[in-house]
Image (cartoon, helix red, strand yellow):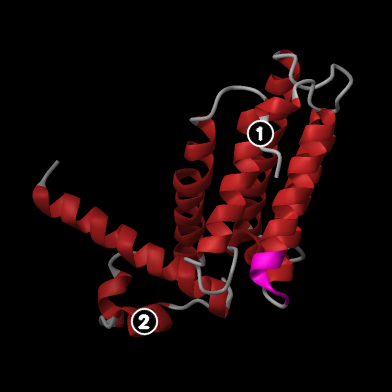
Amino acid sequence: MDGRLLRGERSRGAILDAAVGLATEAGLDGLSLSQLAQRLGVSKSGLFAHWASKEDLQLAVIDQARLQWVDRIVSPALRQPRGVRRLWAAHETRIAFYAEGLLPGGCFFANAQFEFDARPGVVRDRLAEAFAEWLALLERLAAEAIEAGELPAGTDPAQLAFEVNAAGVAAVLHSRLLDPADTFARARHAVLRRLRDLTTDPTLLPEA
């Protein structure tokens, strides 16, 4: 790859990482090239070379947040053994990501989904696509645990995926107003207890 192109891609990624963080504070709709330029200490005109419109920037920020999600949550979880441990890891790495506080305004996706859920358009569609991907992953991991005999045959993968995701959403929302450490501990415990109650081999999961 041409050195200049590589540097350009790295620069674009760094800008988008900053934009994801800013969007958790100002909202995805409140995000602007002017705000981003001010946060980064660069000229607004320089950012126009990357995104010609606010909508283009919003879509790029969603895609960057998806990359962050895969890098910090999905990939570490998928390194765990196939079955109930992998499903548990998907929730545990999500809670750990929130607890690190890398995004100043909490979860990008939780904030953006509430912001755009009643606003039709390409931004909402992109958010819905990302959310559907996450739920589909959780459902697939639950189905794999059933196939491996680590969850009972009668378990509903879609229902279990809904429950695991709901605990994550509650954690990020509650943590903005209540004690974060207590909130994240409760969210972790809620899913761990649910999976330990369901699994055919509780020794596969931590006790607490």
For the residue pair 142 and 67, the one nearer the viewer reads as 142
Residue that lies at the very extreme toward the left in this rendered image: 3
Question: Is the Cβ of the residue at disc 1 closer than 8 Å to that at disc 2?
Answer: no
- Disc number placed over residue 106 in the picture, else none: none
Circle 2: is it few (<14), some (14-19), or many (20+) Cα within 10 Å? few
Q: Is residue 8 above or below residue 150?
A: below
Q: Quadrant of the C terminus?
A: top right
Residue depicted at x 28% and y 67%: 49
Residue range corresponding to the magenta coloring: 178-182
| Label 1: which secondary element | helix
Horizontally, residue 96 falls left or right of residue 42, namely right
Is there any visible trace of residue 194 in the rendered image? Answer: yes
- Per the rendering, the mark at residue 87 is 1
Question: What residue lies at 59% left-to-right and 50% top-to-bottom?
Answer: 94
Q: Quadrant of residue 142?
A: top right
Q: Tell me residue 199's x, y (percent).
A: 79, 26
Q: CA distance from mark 1 to mark 2?
A: 37 Å
Q: Which labelled disc corresponds to residue 39?
A: 2
**Mark nearer the N terminus (1 vs 2):** 2
Measured as percent of width and height from the top left, residue 144 is found at: 68, 20
Residue 139 in magenta stretch? no
Query: Which amino acid lies under the numbered mark 1 shown in the image of this protein?
Result: Leu
